[in-house]
Amino acid sequence: MFIYGQGESNDNLVTNEQNILAFILKWTLNYEQDWVFSIIVYYTMRPSRLKISTYDEILLMYLGDVKGTDKSTVINAFRDFFVSHGETQ
């Protein structure tokens, strides 16, 4: 399990975990897709994400594999998650 949001209350962490799990189940992500989805979502949900001041703090990730491994499913799950949270850009 990834830990983020140091200083957040346990209620917020549980709510966020349930919300993320709901998206994983909605999009029927497999283990690898779940892993990538969780990394990016937790990274973007951390309170300090708006205070990125160095290149080292930027998340860079490559999503690639052979044809037919549902990479677009993960991207669509990201898009759905961020739109549902008011992040349209």
Image: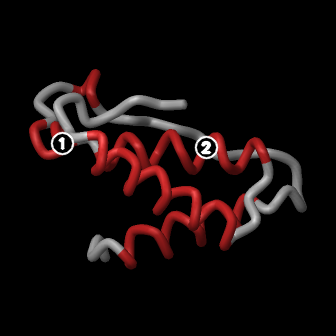
Q: Amino acid at mark 2?
A: Val
Where residue 42 appears, x then y in whole percent? 41, 43
Q: Is residue 74 left or right of residue 46?
A: right
Q: Is residue 68 left or right of residue 39?
A: right
Numbered mark located on residue 36 in the image:
2
User: Residue at horizontal 22%, vertical 41%?
Assistant: 9
Tell which residue pokes out farthest to the top in this image.
56
The quadrant holding residue 60 is top left
Is 59 drawn above or below residue 82 in the view shown? above
Q: Amino acid at mark 1?
A: Pro
Q: Nearer the viewer, residue 55 or 4?
A: 4
Mark 1 touches mark 2? (CB < 8 Å)? no
Q: Is residue 89 visible?
A: no
User: Residue at horizontal 89%, vertical 61%?
Assistant: 68
Where residue 22 appears, x then y in whole percent? 57, 66
User: Residue at horizontal 10%, vertical 38%?
Assistant: 51
Tell me the residue that label 1 is attached to. Answer: 47
Query: Quadrant location of the C terminus?
Result: bottom left
Q: Nearer the viewer, residue 18 or 79?
A: 18
